[in-house]
Image (cartoon, rainbow, N blue to C red):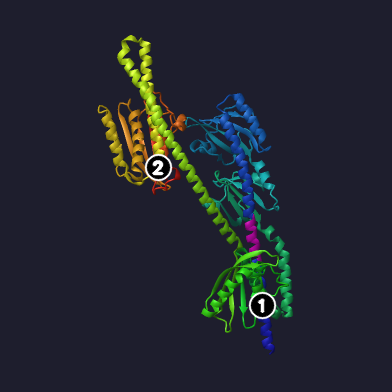
Amino acid sequence: MVTAVALFTALAVLLLWGLSLQLQGQLRDQMLERAQLRSQQLANAMAGQMESSLAVLDLGLLGLRSAWPKSRAAFDEVEQEVLAGLPKGLVSHLSVIDAGGTVIHNSLGVVPGTFVGDRPHFQALRQGSDRLVVGEPVRSRLTGQWQIIVGRPMFRDGAFAGAVHFNVSSEHLARLLGRLALSDNDLVALVHPGGSFLARSLDNAAAMGQNLPPERPFLQNPTAHRGTYRIGGAVDGVPRLFGWQRLPGSGVVVVVGLSQASVLAPLENTRRRALLLTALLSMALLAVGAWIGWLLRNLERRQDEARASQQRLEVAQRLARVGHWTYNPDSGVMGWSQEVFRIFGQDPAVFKPGFDGYWQQVHPEDRGTLEAAIARSRAEHADIDQVHRIVRPDRSVRWVRLLAQRDPVAHERSYSGTLQDISELREAQRALEQLNTELERRVKTRTRELTMLNRDLESFTYSVSHDLRTPLRSIHGFASLLQESDADKLSDDGLDALQRIQSSARRMGLLINDLLSMAQQSRAELRTQHVNLSELARSVARELEQTDPARQVRWEIAEGLSAQADPVLMTVVMQNLLGNAWKYTGRTEAAHIEFFGLEEADGMLNFCVRDNGAGFDMAYADQLFQPFKRLHRLDEFEGTGVGLASVQRILQRHGGSVRGEGVVGQGATFCFSLPLEPVRQFLDSAPDPR
């Protein structure tokens, strides 16, 4: 028995010491992991500050670069303003270097002429793109101090023309890094993408000119943005926990190193107390107590998990407004969840749930329906899914959905189910019904209004067709008779005035015809079907060639272009677009007209008509599709300015669009789109119900 107790005691002591050492190791690892996470967070915070500082420097460089081509006085003013806006001591001076690498200006007032073309930072500026370049630290040939060159290239007509850069003090950056609240052995450093120190909060002078070993993770993987590692310091060999963050654009790395000794120092007293306590527990043979404590901890954890699960269930039910319940008809016991109490507006501490209490709060008008559903469920052994109203103690009415089923697992009769508050859903349904009713009323009102507008438009069309054409024909006819009968009696000015009258009458007639055509196209009903646009374009091209057989025009019409559209209206579109291309290439020797398709995009088919004719000035592109707006004089090209407006209106009715691009003397391109699926006809295109 003594041996058994001794063995048990020995085993208990060994177990206790093993657990103690394991917990200490885990605590140590957790401290180190947290320290690494903290170093990463500090590096991220410091990276934000450094990125802001680089952004301020870059903004200043951009302002200086834009001012350099101007007068020297303007540049000096910008120079003083930029330097005054920078933190004091951050920048020792700025320099401007020509394309050959010679300093042609510096803010120190030193005579220009210093050659920096052999410096790596200048080589990077000359060979790179237009970006901010952060160079490796160098000793300034003007000040003798370690400085970091932050520069931007300058370009003239796309070629490298020199650079403008700031000479940033490494010591100033080191002091900025040292402001981070760290222990004496902790450090913050800026590292060049090539591995050299830019600034170091500890022993900055000793770190200058040194390169980090290539095994550092941010040097092994230049594309990585952040990370952590453990290693001895490259300068002083102190073991540290490092976190690093790479700045976007410049590639500069912010490294924060927390001394492992300082991180673990707060743990030393804890470790000593743990060893002492372990020794006392071992001597007192409290292994049983430790075992019981372990059991209690497990029990508490399970209880916490159960409570957390119950809380999550209650939160989910509250969010979904769904509660659950149980009911035993034999014992009359009913259980409600917290959400059911909330739905009924009852206090769980006062109200005792029961079938009678539930029934009393059912709305009187819904009791008959609910009673029939319960009776049917009992007779058919079916589930219950019933929507009814309840009346809360405050007399407010709520809509609920009751779901009930018999528990197939219980040995005795037992029912369970859910109760959901659907009052907001019912209100939303009622609001939606009212909205639909209002929309139907508005649609009918809009239909009546559009019908009246269509009738007014027909009256206007009739007036234009009959009341305006008749006097125009009379003017033109009498002018023609006057020219035939009394031409020899009129002076040259009179003949010219007579011809102007005839020309104006013909042009007015064309305008009336185009106006009537556009009105008719806007009112015509869309009858969409498959339209072969390639064949339609060839047909229009043949008609145009017949109007002037002597013209030589090279046509390029792509094969297989088609769309779902109204064939009559699409004929108008093609006649206008191809007709314009034919008209505006009339003075081009090698006229060339194309019709081709583009890739589908966002459910739209895209087509283009391109020519090498007169083109137009894009400054007036907003007038292209306005009725009666012309971008060319009438004596250059005939027309009324209605064609493109008709094209836009037709395409919009199809659910598409049109746009134009052009260059004066080089031609124009008009691209239009049509939906893959035909759109519904709008009310304004519906026929008159009369």
* Along the line of sight, the residue nearer the viewer: 186 or 357: 357
State how far apart marks 2 and 1 are (Cα). Answer: 74 Å
Q: Secondary structure at mark 1?
A: helix
Which residue is rendered at x = 70% and y = 51% of the image? 181
Q: Which residue is mark 1?
A: 295
Residue 557 left/right relative to 341: left
Q: Amino acid at mark 1?
A: Leu
Question: Residue 326: x, y in percent?
Answer: 61, 76
Quadrant of the image containing the C terminus: top left
Q: Label 2, on which residue?
A: 673
Residue 515, quarter of the rendered image: top left
Q: Amino acid at mark 2?
A: Ser
Q: Viewer-proximal residue, 34 or 277? A: 34
Compared with residue 347, is residue 248 higher up or lower down, i.e. above or below? above
Count residues near mark 2 (Cα–Cα under 10 Å), then give few for <14, some for 14-19, many for 20+: many
Quick one: quadrant of the N terminus?
bottom right
Question: Residue 297, position in %: x, y?
Answer: 67, 74
Secondary structure mostly taken by the magenta-highlighted segment of the chain: helix
460 sits left or right of 549 in the view = right
Q: Position of residue 60 (x, y in %)?
A: 61, 35
Q: Which residues are drawn in magenta?
A: 27-38
